[in-house]
Amino acid sequence: MKSAPLLANSSRRLFQPSQARRISPFAVTQARSLSTALLPAASQHGLRANRSPSKLEPIAGRRNLSENATEERPWKDVTVEPSPVFLDGKPVRTPQTKIPLPIPFTKPLLATAVALEWDFMTSAQQALQPHHIPATSIAARGYDLVLEDAAVASSESPAPPAPEPTAVPSSKNMREEIIKTVLPYLDTDTVLCWAPPAKDTTEPSLRDKQVATAEPLIKYLSSSIWAGVDLKPGLSGGSIVPAQQSPETRRIVQGWLSGLKAWELVGLERAVLAGKSLVVGARLVCEWGESFADVRKAMGTPRGKRFGIKEAAEACSLEVSWQTRRWGEVEDTHDVEKEDLKRQLGNAILVMQGA
């Protein structure tokens, strides 16, 4: 199938019509909302994003990347099939295994985000800088975990494994490493660290807002994926030593993490590390995970009131927002961290969700 070029000044579709028909209207809406977290960096490279996600116009007085890209980078055209993404007909490769990076056909928005990252670059050196390729890096990590899970399943199968044309990631036990990394956040979860009760105040305190934010999340998780789990606040009542969750709670959560699909576990990892909250990460998995459609149907989440980037970012940065409203915001610090958090959460959603 002939691929469609993804040029900076091109208004053509990223996918062929036959492929575009597989993208639901809701997915298109999500692509537009996620673009606010993924596209702002384009202004750094001489582009300004239009409201129309298929068009990018050059900023006056700056270089037109589509006409001069070959002067500063070795590739000219970026195309998407949607799997994999091609640079002048050569596939984008994973950083570790150096094999072509295939993106599932059920994740066209992720493929589009990867293609946009490479189309915005002005030099090959930018591909070595992680902040330029967040979607590419998380997609590569997801595929590495897919390969590792397949290798483990083949080794445990009594039948001889079929020959695999691709390489297995060099880092072993990636799944165990991810679980070992994110599970401790359960004891120091941002959403579960509450301020001491306020004294002599008639207005809602920081603690009141923290409790009001945490309780719906805890209720959703305990009634959908973590049955029987009783999450306790890590910091409450003025203590500076976080309280550990019960062994039973840790066992249930660890078992749930072990059963996650590769793409969802990698998305959860990115969300937890960005927001310092396993509760928020798990809630995003339930809301956007490709294999959690039954959970969403059972919980009856209205489509227009889904738990997305905005809600997750607000829950993770509630105390910072409270303090900056009182004392002011440090320029080029709080505002940058806020946008970076949204970008990281947006990439986590992209790698979790399906068409």
Image: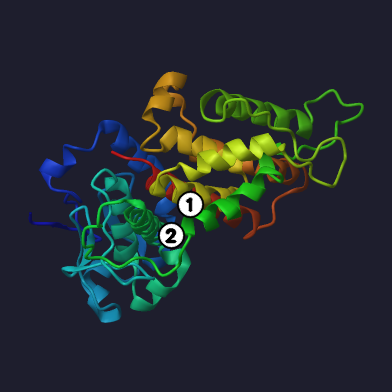
How far across and how far down the image is residue 67, in percent? 21, 71
Residue under the point 45% across and 51% down: 266
- Mark in front: 1 vs 2: 2
- The residue lying toward the viewer, choosing from 18 and 171, is 171
Name the residue beneath numbered marker 1: 343
Q: Which amino acid does label 1 sit on?
A: Arg
- Decide if residue 242 is on the left or right side of residue 272: right
User: Can you tell which mark lies on residue 134?
Assistant: 2
> In the rendered image of this protein, does residue 28 appear above or below residue 161?
above
- Decide if residue 117 is on the left or right side of residue 226: left
**How would you rate the neighbour count of disc 1 (Cα within 10 Å): few for under 14, some for 14-19, many for 20 or more?**
many
Report if residue 310 is visible in the image. Answer: no
Residue under the point 64% across and 59% down: 333
Q: Which amino acid does label 2 sit on?
A: Pro
User: Which of pointers 1 and 2 lies earlier in the amino acid sequence?
Assistant: 2
- Badge 1 marks a residue whose secondary structure is helix
How far across and how far down the image is residue 21, in percent? 16, 37
Indicate the quadrant where residue 161 lies: bottom left
User: Can you tell which mark lies on residue 265?
Assistant: none
Q: Could you tell me if the residues under marks 1 and 2 are in contact, i.e. CB atoms within 8 Å?
A: yes
